[in-house]
Amino acid sequence: MDALFQLRPDIRARERAMNDKSTSRRPGPRNLITDVAGLRVGNAHDEMVRSGVTAVLCDPPAVAAVQVLGGAPGTRETDLLEPHNMVETVHAIVLAGGSAFGLDAASGVQAVLRDRGQGVIVHGHVVPIVPAAILFDLANGGDKAWGDNPPYRALGIEAALAADEEFALGTEGAGHGALTAGLKGGIGSASECVDDFIVGALVAANPVGGATMGRGRHFWAAPFEIGAEFGGLGLPARLPADAAELKLKFRELSPGGNTTIGVIATDADLTKAEAKRLAIAAHDGYARAIWPSHTPLDGDLVFALATGASGRRPDAAGFVALCAAAASAMARAVARGVFEATRRDGDLFPAWRDTAS
């Protein structure tokens, strides 16, 4: 009977190999989501409005899924990403500020892709599939008096045209006007090599909670940091007494006033159901990097993309490793977004770099 519970030799060998690899975690060459072949990212922002857009372009189209765990999401075309629905792949993902106004950004990205002939062909018409999610940055001090012409469609076009394998982090794109509890938020990204696959994360960090411990500078994501990608402070010698205290962004809280939105991607060949499981795992990165996360006042969401560029499918153990890397890379991306944020005149909160050591 005990033999039923003994690992087969091939599984034991696989486990040893995974453990050996786990001691040498490393990012991809750019430490960006664009280390996943087939993806390019573009940022655009409006300095006066203090808001922006980030577009992830998929060439070729990528298998996609989504998982929403926040209580106040704002989205476009997420229902079609459920595994039981027909559309398998998408041509782009859009993250935007502007609350519900920001959903216009996806129309701008869609227009660029249609002009390029990229989309699903339906009765001779090109229809790009561009799901989107938004965060709330209306109360960050920017000028939102745009009348009947919100800037987000134009920003979507600009972001799509700017898409490249290299892109800036921090006070850029959808993270341009992002705030956390007590510090500026921002757009962050990270990648991780795992079992001959690449996992990449992209996130606009704008939570009601904080990315650092208490009133200190140490990041909650410190256990997952590679090198000194967000300061190299590590964990404090002793956890601060206020580490677990709730520090929230605004005294007056309202649903939809926050939100962390992101994309997890891999070059593995995955089904839609597997991509959804990867998105679920990536939410653990939010929980590791933000306290508190997934609140009723956040619209926390993760899109998942599987480009299949590696030409390989992971086995069961390999998929577990991908899920772990998804959480790790996402936690690092959140911290990098806050770490890379920079000061602007009129900021409500300081940037991490400007806080006392």
Image (cartoon, rainbow, N blue to C red):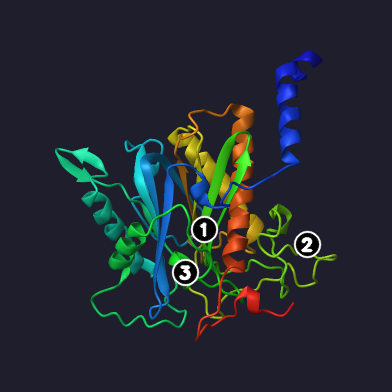
* Mark 3, secondary structure of its residue: loop
- Look at mark 3 in the image and give the residue it sits on: 255
- Look at mark 1 in the image and give the residue it sits on: 203
Task: Indicate the position of residue 226 as horizontal and vertical percent values.
Answer: 69, 53
Task: Indicate the position of residue 126 as horizontal and vertical percent values.
Answer: 20, 44
Sequence-wise first label, 1 or 3: 1
75 or 168, which lies in front? 168
Which amino acid, mark 3?
Answer: Pro
Task: Indicate the position of residue 28 as horizontal and vertical percent values.
Answer: 59, 46
- Of discs 2 and 3, which sits in the foreground? 2
57 or 205, which lies in front? 57
Name the residue at 75% across, 65% down: 233
| Mark pair 2, 3: CA separation | 32 Å
Sequence-wise first label, 2 or 3: 2
Residue 8 visible in the shown view: no
Left or right of 305, for residue 282: right
- Look at mark 2 in the image and give the residue it sits on: 235
Q: Within 10 Å of the Cα at label 1, are there few (<14), some (14-19), or many (20+) other Cα atoms?
A: many
Q: Within 10 Å of the Cα at label 3, are there few (<14), some (14-19), or many (20+) other Cα atoms?
A: some
Name the residue at 48% across, 56% down: 166
* Mark 1, secondary structure of its residue: strand
Say the numbered circle drawn on residue 139.
none
154 or 270, which lies in front? 154
Task: Tell me the quadrant of the picture where the C terminus can be found.
Answer: bottom right
Task: Tell me the quadrant of the picture where the N terminus can be found.
Answer: top right
| Mark pair 1, 2: CA separation | 22 Å
